[in-house]
Image (spheres, helix red, strand yellow):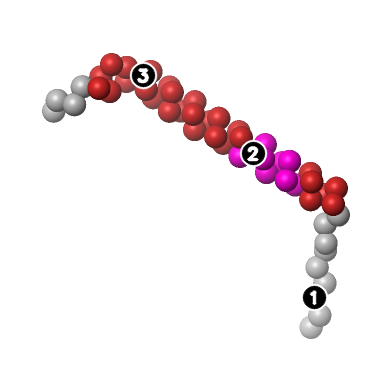
Amino acid sequence: MDLQTVKPTEKQLKAQRSRSIAIALALAAFVVIVYVVSVVRIGPAILDRSF
């Protein structure tokens, strides 16, 4: 059985790379926002290590 694969064009590869970079940047921004919000909500208590 001979399977044929579709080869993307250079334009499609460039668009795919651009989308991948945009998704990676959005994910990184989300992680930073969640981290900053967590630190702000905890506030100075983050440095208090007494149990």
Find the distance from the CA under tag 3 to the CA under tag 1.
55 Å
**In the rendering, which numbered label is found on residue 41?**
3
Q: Residue furthest bottom?
A: 1
Find the distance from the CA under tag 2 to the CA under tag 1.
31 Å
Q: Quadrant of the C terminus?
A: top left
Q: Is the Cβ of the residue at disc 2 closer than 8 Å to that at disc 1?
A: no
Q: Is the Cβ of the residue at disc 3 closer than 8 Å to that at disc 1?
A: no
Q: Position of residue 38 (x, y in %)?
A: 39, 24
Residue position marked by numbered label 2 in the rendering: 23
Q: Residue furthest left?
A: 51
Specify the principal SS of the magenta part: helix
Residue name at image x 14 percent, y 25 percent: 50
- Which is more N-terminal, label 3 or label 2? 2
How dense is the environment of label 1, judged by Cα within 10 Å: few (below 14), some, or many (20 and up)? few
Looking at the rendered structure, the kind of residue marked 3 is: Arg
Q: Position of residue 26 (x, y in %)?
A: 60, 33
Please provide the residue range marked out in magenta: 16-24
Looking at the rendered structure, the kind of residue marked 1 is: Leu
How dense is the environment of label 3, judged by Cα within 10 Å: few (below 14), some, or many (20 and up)? few
Residue name at image x 53 percent, y 31 percent: 30
Residue position marked by numbered label 1 in the rendering: 3
Check disc 3 and report its element: helix, strand or loop: helix
Q: Position of residue 49 (x, y in %)?
A: 19, 26
Residue name at image x 43 percent, y 22 percent: 37
- Which is more N-terminal, label 1 or label 3? 1
Q: Position of residue 43 (x, y in %)?
A: 32, 17
Looking at the image, residue 22 lies above or below residue 13: above
23 relative position to 7: left or right: left
- Which is more N-terminal, label 1 or label 2? 1
